[in-house]
Amino acid sequence: MPETEHIIDINGLVKRFNGTAVIDGIDLSVSKGEVVVLIGPSGCGKSTLLRCINGLEPIDAGTVTLHGEPVVHNSRNLYKIRQKIGMVFQSYDLFPHLTVLKNIMLAPMKVQKRSKEEIRAEALKLLERVGLSDKAESFPSELSGGQKQRVAICRSLIMNPEIMLLDEITAALDPEMVHEVLDVVLDLAKNGTTMLIVTHEMAFAKAAADRIVFIDGGVIVEESEPDEFFTAPKTERAKKFLKTFTYSR
Amino acid sequence: MGGAEILFIGNNFARLLEGLWVTVRISLISIAFSLVLGTALGAAMTVKNRAVRAVCRVYLEIVRVMPQLVWLFIVFFGITKLTGLNLGGETSAVIVFTLWGTAETGDLVRGAFQSVPKHQRESALSLGLTKFQSYVYIIFPQALRGLIPNIINLSTRMIKTTALVSLIGVTEVLKVGKQIIDANRFEYPNAAIWVYAAIFFMYFAICFPLSWAASRLAKKSRKSD
Amino acid sequence: MTLYALSGKIKITESLGQILVDFEFIEKFTPMYLEAARLTVLIGAAGIVLAAAVGLLCALVKYYRVPVARQIVSAYIELSRNTPLIVQLFFLYFGLPKAGIRLSSEVCGIIGLAFLGGSYMAESFLGGLTSVGKIQLESAESLGLRRHQVMNLIVIPQAGAVAAPAVCANVIFLLKETSVFSAVSLADLMYVAKDLIGMYYNTGEALLMLVVAYLALILPISVIFAILERRLRRGRS
């Protein structure tokens, strides 16, 4: 049953900070080629969920698996699993002491030990795809926020991950740069990249998502197709949340 | 390795404390002078006139480049030789530590003023405050917050450095310690380890609270930024 | 010498004359200063290298929050930073033999400098390490880099650049601190100068040579460090 091949499986996930449950029992699966967008109010646990999937946080209950392999914080083989999970963060997290090209080439060279020429060619191709061919030899400090995020996406893509986790990647950007980054993500979505995205850009969520997952208070409140979610949300909480994005006098 | 009693025989402990007071007194006097002169120097280092700034900078670098002990030698031996005036160790020390403290304080004061962002002054002026008011209510309080921990740290550095005055003949705690050790050479052959350990912890007892306070204040001022 | 009985004014001119004139004295004792400078550099370099090693170890202990060792390191740093080097040296040189540990002047100098400098170096290194943000570590980890790779490829290059200026400042500071070595009978520059002043009363020449010797040691290093720092900053921005 190829259509239901799950990449990520989350079962009964609970995550507490100082006793308070930030994630309070979440079940979620992402299938191959699917784009799932997580939305919800600030502090609802979306970002924490992504961090748990990547093993950046220890979890208090439940399981997270990638192709059936458990993802466990601080476990010995975590680095192997992480190669298959690409993650882009909200803040510009490029390595400041390396050029754009070296930022992208670092992990495939050191982790996957692929040949330098091959990686180089692929890195340049990726840069071309995101419209940054001319920045290959620049340092991160010479780039705008939007350019940095596009490079960060390339840096994850070159590892050929099974899934990309995007954690509010445009939240720290100036408004005019949001588009250039989201265009890249939309392009990935069209080409069948499996993604789990946290965002506050509703128009983008609608355009990119195969499925919208609305989270509030650490639990999944509603799960539906984007058209349905934005036009006819089933729950009161989702209605209230969507209202915060409209203005009226 | 007994012999710790040596510290408490007769008035030995009091004598050590008296010796310590000699260096502390030198530091306190030098710090007081340095604060006044250093503030003036710091103000001079922020003026627009490039020549004034250059002169201050040269003074700072000249004082800094040489170890303090070399300066103590220059003033203590050199001035005596050059002028025939016998300054004595304590006066020489106060001169050297004041010259040094002034330079370092000046640099700290300059840094403190320049650390207040330009827009603070601009927004004060745009609120209608006069230049004088903007200094009193906006600039000084902010500059002072970062400056105080640095001044405390400088003071601890000066107190530690005054331990050098034993090398230009001032009878301070290390000299007193040696006198006690020598006088009890036969009854207490192990006195040296106890006396010098005691002096070590005496300095620690003075300097540690100061650096602790400084780091607390520095943390607090960083947090409120 | 009878001139000294005369008025201060004559003494000044006479002394100034001596400073300018007595090249014979300078020539005669230059080898002594050179030998002393060599000793200062040797002991200083050994002490500074050891201080850097101690500092790196302490910084790593604090960075990785190693239990117990962390508390010991904190206590050491406070003891080292809040006591004068000369007192540390007196304890090592005059005190420790009473406990059966007899160290030569040279060894005392090296250990003393390492004890003092270790804490300064530790704080500089730690400052560098902690300047590399958590997000840098997380993004490196999420690319699948292993712990040691994150350290070698991401943390150390960035931390090194941040710590370098502070480490350079420590080197100069410690080099200047070596001037107290004469207090534990190490025949360094101060020792020679004091000896000559005591023996020959050629104070002017002795001090002049002392100053020149220290300038010759410290100035080139300061200039090199300043150039390196500027280059480093330019590479960054």
Image (cartoon, helix red, strand yellow):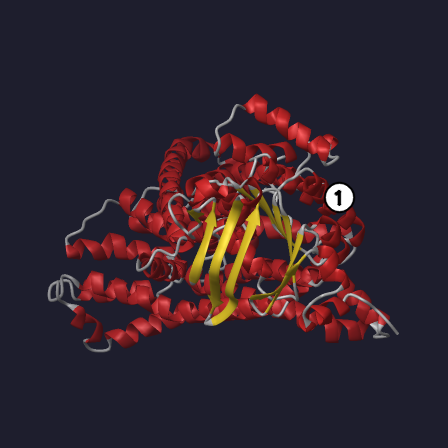
Judged from the image, the secondary structure of the residue bearing numbered disc 1 is helix
Q: Which residue occupies the extreme right position in the image?
A: A249
Left of C61 or right of it: where is A222?
Answer: right
Quadrant housing the C terminus of chain A: bottom right
Q: Is residue A137 above or below residue B87?
A: above
Percent x, y of residue C177: 42, 49
Any part of residue A224 in sight: yes
Left of C113 or right of it: where is C166?
Answer: right
> How would you rate the neighbour count of disc 1 (Cα within 10 Å): few for under 14, some for 14-19, many for 20 or more?
some
Left of A174 or right of it: where is A83?
Answer: left
Chain to which the residue tagged by mark 1 belongs:
A
Q: Residue at x 22, y 57 (%)?
A: C95
Percent x, y of residue A103: 60, 36
Q: Residue at x 33, y 73 (%)?
A: B17
Q: Which residue occupies the extreme front position in the image?
A: A1
Percent x, y of residue B133: 79, 75
- Reading the image, the residue beneath label 1 is A183
Q: Residue at x 28, y 47 (%)?
A: C108
Between A228 and C91, the residue placed more toward the observer is A228
Between C170 and A117, the residue placed more toward the observer is A117
Type of the residue with mark 1: Asp
